[in-house]
Amino acid sequence: MAPPADEQMRTLAAVAVPLLGLTAMLALVTAGAEAWRYALLLASRSDAVPAGPLRASDVLVVTGGVVSLLSAALAGAVTLGWLVHAHAAAARAAAVMPARRGWQLVVGALVPGLNLVVPGAALAELEHTTLGQHPDHRPRPSRLVIGWWAIWVIGLVLAGTAVLWNLRGGVQARADGVLLHVATDLVAGAVAITTIVVVRRLTRLLSPVTLTRARRMVVVRVPGGTR
């Protein structure tokens, strides 16, 4: 028997948050490596740059790019699973039908074009249901969800632009491409950090955890009592 959606949601949130934190860290490290590469490209215009720093920057950029991409893919898959189960848990708690089916959330997050709209709309709907708003009313996302949505769209646009920019040739195009990758990595880190805040907030709203102090049994000896 499969565990309920709220339990799966909590489990996935507990896995997604550290993965997103790792992704943010790797994205920022990769952005630093790209910035170093750009500085070396600028220096090479006026003077010869030793081969050692060039090779080291290339290794950092390639390694950081591959590892951060793998981390982002894993974190994204877990976070998407959290979103699917969070939608189901919120709908069950509110005794309403889910605004979107699980497969619609997955397709909307993966298909280019749709992924500009569906993830943000799904979070707005989830927040709307979680806060107990009337199901017939149009969701009005909070500033947090709107901010996440804006950063998410900017990140996707930058990533697509960076891929297309790599098709261009020339030294100047390469230098501009490095700056574009720096911006893409920085925004990717911002998306990961903001996603952590969103996941934690909505999970806490859906499944609040009450911390209680454990009671301890203490033996008290009464003066003058019998032994």
Image (cartoon, rainbow, N blue to C red):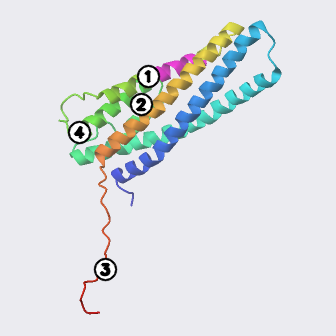
Between the C-alphas of marks 4 and 1, the distance is: 25 Å
Instruction: Tell me the distance, in whole angstroms, between the alpha carbons under discs 2 and 3.
Output: 61 Å
Q: CA distance from mark 4 to mark 3?
A: 46 Å
Residue at the bottom extreme of this rendering: 227
The location of residue 171, given as percent across then percent down, is 71, 9
Say whether residue 117 is visible: no
Q: Residue 153's mark?
A: 1
Confirm or deny contact between disc 2 and disc 3 (CB under 8 A).
Answer: no
Disc 3 vs disc 1: which is toward the camera?
A: 3
User: Would you say the magenta stretch is mainly helix, strand or loop?
Assistant: helix
Residue that label 4 marks: 131
Q: Position of residue 136 (x, y in %)?
A: 18, 32
Q: Earlier in the sequence, mark 3 or mark 1?
A: 1
Check disc 4 and give the amino acid type: Leu
Q: Residue furthest front?
A: 224
Q: Secondary structure at mark 1?
A: helix
Query: Residue under circle 3?
Result: 219
- Figure quadrant of residue 163: top right
**Which quadrant of the view contains residue 65?**
top right
Q: Rounded to the nearest whole Å, what is the CA distance between mark 3 and mark 1?
A: 62 Å
What segment carries the magenta color? 154-163
Q: Nearer the viewer, mark 4 or mark 3?
A: 3
Check disc 1 and give the amino acid type. Answer: Val
| Residue at x 44% of width, y 48% of height | 14
- Compare marks 2 and 4 and give the one earlier in the sequence: 2
Q: CA distance from mark 1 to mark 2?
A: 13 Å
- Asked whether the residues under the numbered discs 4 and 3 touch, taking CB atoms below 8 Å apart as contact, a structural biologist would say no
**Residue 135 seen in this snapshot:** yes
For image coordinates 63% across by 20% down, the residue present is: 35
Gap between marks 2 and 4, in whole Å?
23 Å
